[in-house]
Each structure stands twice: as structure tokens, then as C-alpha cells.
Image (cartoon, coloured by chain):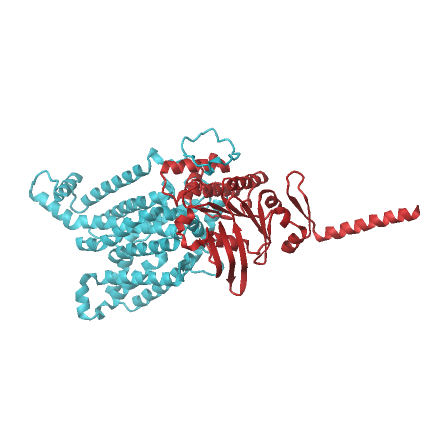
Amino acid sequence: MNGSPSSLSALRLGRSQPAATTQETSAERRYPLGLNAPGILVALGLLLLIVSVLASGAGALAIPPGDVLAILANNIGLGVGPSPDSRALQYEMVLTGIRLPRVVLGIIAGAGLSVAGALMQGLFRNPLADPALIGVSSGASFGASLMIVLGSLLPGFLASAFGSFSIAIAAFVAGLIVTWIVYRIATHGAQTSVTTMLLAGIALNALCGAGTGTLILFSNDNQLRDLTFWSLGSLGAATWTTVLVVAPLTILAIALTPRMARALNAMLLGESEAQALGIHTERLKKSVIVLSALAVGATTAVTGLIGFVGLVVPHLIRLSFGPDHRLLLPASALLGATLLVAADVLSRTLIAPSEIPIGILTALAGAPFFLWLLLRSQGGAWGGARGAGGAGGAGGARSAGGVRAARAGSLGTTNDPMGVKEA
Amino acid sequence: MLELRNISFHVGDKALLDQVSLEVHPGEVLAIVGANGAGKTTLTNILSGKKRPQTGDVLLDGTSMYTHTPNTLARRRAVLPQFSNLSFAFTVFEVVLLGRTPHQTSASNDAEICLDAMRVTGVEHLASREYPTLSGGEQQRVHLARALAQIWHPNGDGDRYIFLDEPTASLDLAHQHHVLQIARDCAKLGLGVLAVLHDLNLAAEHADRIAIMRQGTIAAVGSPDDVLTSDNIEAAFDISVMVTQHPHAACPLVVAVPEEDIDLRLAREEQALNETIQQLLNE
């Protein structure tokens, strides 16, 4: 291994303090339950499968998990032979026509939002970042409002061409446009400033909010109701068509992220450190923004705003398994999918036959959890499960304060709100 | 060889670097010293590729450094930053492992190199600790291990370089010397080492060559004996110094002598002289 004469293995050893009585057998991180990284992904995948099967069975017409699996197997050609009594037919119609598209949309949306959240937190080097920072959500919100309130003014041929997708298309396009503006503002020459992007995002979020508010002013009662429900999110629009529209963009985004995992790890050290490690940081920033905007834009367009998933899920993974993006990205996708499918079951069963908007549920569960994280992190390092003091704690608290101040719109005193100043 | 040729770097009207030329040779430790704001950090930023000069060339083995891809450059050149505010809870081992980012070597090979590098900088007992819980000095040594792991083995791309930006800033006395000993050993193994240092005596003891920077220019460059003269130092740092011989090593020793002390000493010497004259006259 150290064959070459000029390998640094020839360096003298340092005087390190003797290790404590607990001699490490390996320097690798130890994961809970004795799992390794692939084991964790398999476990999370199984959890997603179980929750999805249970979710597909839950509802006004309860379908036993066994029947769900049998119908699924049948549909992909693994059936044990048809047994078409009337109940089985009814099961199959409800399952494939209503439940499955909704569960699949939940999986795609949950995975997309969570991966986008993990990407943003890596890019901004801040665990409090979420996809809304680049303006895609508020842009989509503005686009949707525009279509809900003023859609009737569209020329007839456009309205008929887009049909029921007009709101989704407007939301998607507006989300991407706003993100593009944020990106352009933060980019000078060939360089994108992450700090400027954060500030520009806040400004454009406020602007979009003002636009949406103005539209509310001119909306009638029906439109106002539509707007309100859109902003609370729902998987109720799920059909196989919506799934087919959203899936390619989101799956593409998720599929491309593993290639960026190592680069994002290096990016956590800082932009110039990442550059010194051979990372094309400008290219990385661009990919992260484009992929997040696509995933979040496509999802939000058909589900409305679903908050907190993108923020909390990567956080949960980091707390349990550490910040390595090679595990964080796929694990966030799986856990985010699981949580959103579970939340959707609650949303459509708790007060059936009415539905609770899913955004209410994710915020109800996510916000207290997030507050708990905030209180906890004041005494320790971000994403560190074990108590930590000293420098890390101070840094974490400082960045947290920065984001809160920035979110509140007070850009005044700090010129380094994310703690991202390059040294 | 890494070479800066007539580099200038301006921010607005202010020239942070003005027509700077400097060479870093494989196998030497080159120390950069200078007062705050003299341009040391800008110089290392240009060498490490973080900033591009407005005029002048940065040449690696005779061709422009910017024609190399970031990845090939990263396999030849490691940078130890002045500080790094990493607030994500990587373990120490994982941070060092980041040094292997530019390489396509196997995981077990990477792990072995990283453990070796951690042994060299004396942090292997911290391997499974979370990085943010370490002290500043420990964090510095973890990053040094990361930088060493990045250029651990020679590869076909050419000579390797390591840039250390104030590597001793948060270290205790023993570790300051240990880190510079590592730098020395790296040079002995054929690496080009460039270190920004504030402590002139550390530079005198461990560097082959010293470059003194003043107001964006290289005021003097050469061996410690040639460069560390009281005139050079007083011009660059605006403080009076005495340069004597190091009692132990074969290098100069610089002692700062603030002005008031000089006046006092001169007054005392004058007084002593007067007393002697008085005595002689009395006799």
C-alpha cells in the first residue's frame, strides 16, 4: 500500500493522547440497531412498502393488506389466478382507480420535497434551509392564485387546451420563473453567491406574497375558498394522469442526486474548501437549484403547498444517521415518502367523508417537532444526536438566529445571515 | 514547479497584490510572512485557485494552472484553510475522509490512508467524535489530516503541493512545532509546502525560504538568514526588533523591542556611559 518512497506514510507520527478505555475497532460511524448504510435504506424501503400497503387499504371501504398485495401482484402479472367475485372486483376498482394513484402521488411528492430540502440544506450549509428559500413555492403560489382568480379571463382556446391542468401549469411555470429570477440576481459573471441568493429569495417571496394577497383582494368567495385550500395542500387531485405528469420530473431529480452526494459533503466544509477538493462548485450549485426547483415545482403544482416535509425529514435522518449525503439523500426520499403517505391517510380518514388539508397535518406534526429541535440545538451541534457544547453550539445558534432574522425580513445588521461567509 | 508571474489583484482602486512574482519549488518549505493586510491571504487564495488575478500568470509546471481541471488540481494540491466553520455533525473520521473526494480509490484504501493521516497529526483517538464538539486546535489538526489524506500518495499527475494558511493559529506550543515538523517532513518527501505564518521565529526555524510581504508586494525573499534582518522586519511590520542567533538551532531569532523600551535602554546606556566618564574624570 505504501510502496512509493514519497508516500506521506513516511511522516512521523504525532503525539496523540492515548485513546480512552473504549478502544474503537473501526473508525466508521456506528448506526442504530447495528445496521449499515445499505441496511438502513432497505429498512426504510420496507417501512415505505408496509405503510403504502396499509394506506392503500385504509378508507371508507377497508381493504385487507392481503387483498391489496394480491391485487397488486395480479396487476403486474404475478397473480395466482383470477377469483373474480363481486367484492374482489370492487376492491380492485377502488384500489387501482382511487387509492393507488393517491398513494403513488404521496410517495413521489414526499420523496421529492424531502430530497429538495436535503439539497437546499446542503447548498446553504444550513440545516434550517428549505426549498421555499429559492422562491419556487411562493412563485407557484402566485401562479396558482393568478389562474384561480383570473383564469376565467383566459382566451377560450387556451382554457380548453389546458383544461383542469391550467392551475397546475400556471403554478409550475411561475415557480420556475421566480427561481430563475432569484438565481439570476445572485449570479455575477460565472459565480453564484449563495448569500445573495438567500436574500433575493426572501425579497421575491415577499413580492409573490404581496401579489397573491392582491389577487385575494379581488377574488370572490368561491375563488377565495379554492385559494385557501390550494395553499394548505392536498393529494386529492391524484389521478394516474397527474401521477404520470409529476413522476418523470421528480424521479429524474431524485435519480440524479446520488451523483452529487460526495460533492455536497465537500460543500459542507465551505465553498472554497470544496473547490480545493476538486469540486466544480458553480456547476453543483446550478444542478442543485435546477433539480430542487423541478421537483418542488412539479409537486407543488398538483398538490398545493405542503410545508415542513422538506425541512423536517432531512433533519430527522441527519439526527439518526449523520450528515453524509450518500445516505442522507436516498434515506430522506424514503422517509419523506413514508411520512407523506401516512399523513395523507390521516387527512382522508380522520373526519371522513370530509378531508383535512394535508398541509395542516404536516404543519401540526412538523412545527412542534421543529421547535423541539430548535430548543435542543441551542445546547449542541446541528444534527448531532449527542449533546455538544463549545464552538459548534455557538456556530449553530448563530446561523439559526440568522435565518430567523432573515425570514422575518430584517436584513439590516448582519451581512452574513447564513454564516456562509467565505473565509 | 508552481509559479506566480507578475500577479496583480485589485479590489476597486486598491491593489491587494501589485506585480507579485514568486515560485514554490517541490521539496521546499516556503513561509509567507507580513503584517495584517499585506496581501498574504490574497496570495494564497490565488495560489489555491479561489481567486483569479486580473493580470499575470499562475503557472503549474510551465502551463497555466487554470487549464487543469479542478479534479486533477485537487489530486496534486491540498489547502489547509485558516478556519472552517463546519457545523454539521460529521465524525472526525468522516471529515478526514472528505480529503479523498478527488480520488477514485476503494473505500478500504481511503480508510487506511485517513487513519494513517490522523495518526500523523495526532487525532486518531478522536476518530469517532463529532467534529463540532472538538476544540479549535483539535479541529485544525483534523483539517490538516484531511489535507494530508488528499495528497497522501504520489500520482502520475506531477509534483504535489500543500498550502497551509496560518496552520499554527489555534495550536499550543508543542503542536505548533509538530505541525511545522510535518510540513518539513512533507518537503523532505518531495512536496512543495507554502505556509502563511505570523510567528517569525517559527518561520525562521522551519522554512527553507521566507517571503516577506508588504503592501501587496514581496519586499524580500530568500533564506531566513538573508531575509530576517532587522531592517527588513522593521520596514514590513513597523516595529523595532533585535535579530540574534537562535540559542539552539542554526537560524536567526527575532525579538520585538517596542520603541519606548529602546528609548529607555538608550537612556540607561547613556546614563551608564556618563557614570563611567564621571568615574574616569574623578580618577
Looking at the rendered image, the quarter that the N terminus of chain A falls into is: top left
In the image: residue B165, left or right of residue A137: right
In the rendered image of the structure, the colour used to display chain A is cyan
Residue B155 can be seen, yes or no:
yes
A58 is higher (above) or lower (below) than A293: above
Residue in the picture at 28% in, 44% down: A334
Residue drawn at the location 89% of the way across and 49% of the way down: B278
Kindly indicate which chain is depicted in red in the rendered structure. Answer: B
Residue B89 visible in the current orientation:
no
What is the number of callouts on the image? 0
Q: Residue at x 19, y 46 (%)?
A: A59
Task: Check the image and report above or below for B52 versus A388.
Answer: below
Q: How far across and down, in percent of the image, does residue B52 sit?
A: 46, 58
As displayed, is residue A374 above or below residue A215? above
Tell me the quarter of the picture where residue A64 sits: top left
Viewer-side residue, B252 vs B85: B252
Give x and y (percent) for residue A248. Answer: 23, 53
Depth order, front residue of B224/B133: B224
Question: Is B239 left or right of A68, judged from the image as shown?
Answer: right
Q: Which residue lies furthest to the front in this view?
A: B62
